[in-house]
Image (cartoon, rainbow, N blue to C red):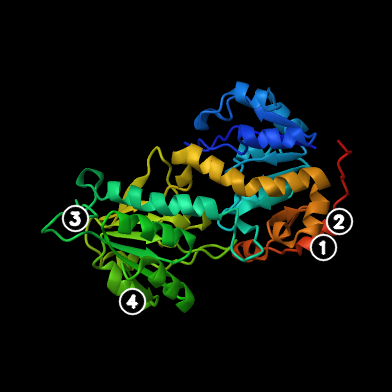
Amino acid sequence: MIIGCPREIKNHEYRVGLTPESVAELTQRGHSVLMEAGAGDGIGAADDDYAAAGAEVTDVETVFGWADIVVKVKEPQRVERERLRTGQTLYTYLHLAPDPDQTDDLIDSGATCIAYETVTGPGGGLPLLRPMSQVAGRMSVQAGAHALEKAQGGRGVLLGGVPGVAPGRVIVIGGGVVGRNAAQMAVGLGADVTVLDRSHDVLEDIDRQFAGRVRTVYSTATALNDLIGAADLIVGAVLIPGASAPKLVTRAMLGGMQPGTVIVDVAIDQGGCFETSKPTTHADPIYEVDGIVHYCVANMPGAVARTSTYALNNATLPHLLRMADLGVKTALDRDAHLRAGLNVADGRITCRPVAEAQGLDWISAEEALARLPDRTPEPA
């Protein structure tokens, strides 16, 4: 197999789809790797490091033109989508539900598109999303603490407080991976932390994990409305796999918040869980609506690119090795968890939540795979 890894071109995205160590794993199995020149600069991996691992360092046209599997981090930008072709496999984060333009382009490309964020794990959960959720959850409090500074438009509150002054109040909406990691960071800073969720099991786990240092509240509209009115920082950490995030905080609810309260919407990749959220970038991360500061960067982990890239590769590499060794179709046929990541194939949507979010037809992954030609790699 020929594996291609282009340089990420999204605004302030410094991660890369493959580390030199991942390249070595592939080339040692007899596969070819094409790396775009400069792809690893953001994590401190030079072209010479990739060449030493066995990759051919080349230009972006060659990467897309020759690769059987294109490995990325973020969803392909329009110019990248135009380079995809029938018979090629794209392996990356997609977050299609709130992005009909990307969906249309991927359908038209004829490529087989596997989304990291919907690949499942044997024990449940989303193992390829988990490492970035851990990073984003921890960063959400770091970013929120900075946005709370008066110079950034925030309330001028120090989350940990000081002796004689109460700590800041942090509300985390959602007790999944993002929410727990946000709570961990907020507790570490000494903040007053409350987590809302609709699962009793999740709330019990959080109570045990933090030994009472985090308040847990069953999430209802009334409870949420009451809590956000006294909050300094609100972290949106809601996820419905593959689907658009529910809008849990409406614009009308902003009027009940204290001016300068900070919202960090970690669900922005899936459309955001605040009605007033819109994607921002690391170059211009915050904006205000009705006196409330919004931080809605859609690629938060890109700011800590080296940590994020290595954490992501630890999760994505095993599936990539199987696809390279067995062929994409065979790997998908044999592994229901990887197959759950199939979002587009044979010019059709194969992920039901994406189709429902956009009002489009879909077919099952199994039906789509039956239409794809076999492409079994030659023995190394």
Is label 3 in a helix, a strand or a loop?
Answer: loop
**Frontmost residue, 242 versus 193:** 193
Residue 49 position in % (x across, y down): 61, 25
Camera-side mark, 3 or 2: 3
Residue visible at 68% across and 34% down in the picture = 23
CA gap between label 4 and label 1 equals 44 Å
Q: Which mark is residue 371?
A: 2
**Frontmost residue, 118 versus 318:** 318
CA gap between label 3 and label 4 equals 25 Å
Is tag 2's residue or tag 4's residue first in the polypeptide sequence? 4
Residue visible at 26% across and 65% down in the picture = 255
Q: Which mark is residue 367?
A: 1
Q: Which residue is mark 4?
A: 223
In the rendered structure, the answer to whether residue 34 lies left or right of residue 326 reads left
Camera-side mark, 2 or 4: 4
**Frontmost residue, 191 versus 42:** 191
CA gap between label 2 and label 1 equals 7 Å
Residue visible at 51% across and 32% down in the picture = 43
Amino acid marked by disc 2: Arg
Residue 293 position in % (x across, y down): 30, 53
Is label 2 in a helix, a strand or a loop?
Answer: helix
Residue 19 position in % (x across, y down): 60, 35
Q: Give the vertical position of 70 relative to 330 (above or below).
A: above
Is tag 3's residue or tag 4's residue first in the polypeptide sequence? 3
CB-based contact (under 8 Å), mark 2 and mark 1: yes
CA gap between label 3 and label 2 equals 60 Å
Amino acid marked by disc 1: Glu
Question: Based on the displayed image, in which of its 4 quarters is residue 227 positioned?
Answer: bottom left
In the rendered structure, the answer to whether residue 99 lies left or right of residue 323 reads left
> How many marks overall?
4
Q: Which residue is mark 3?
A: 161
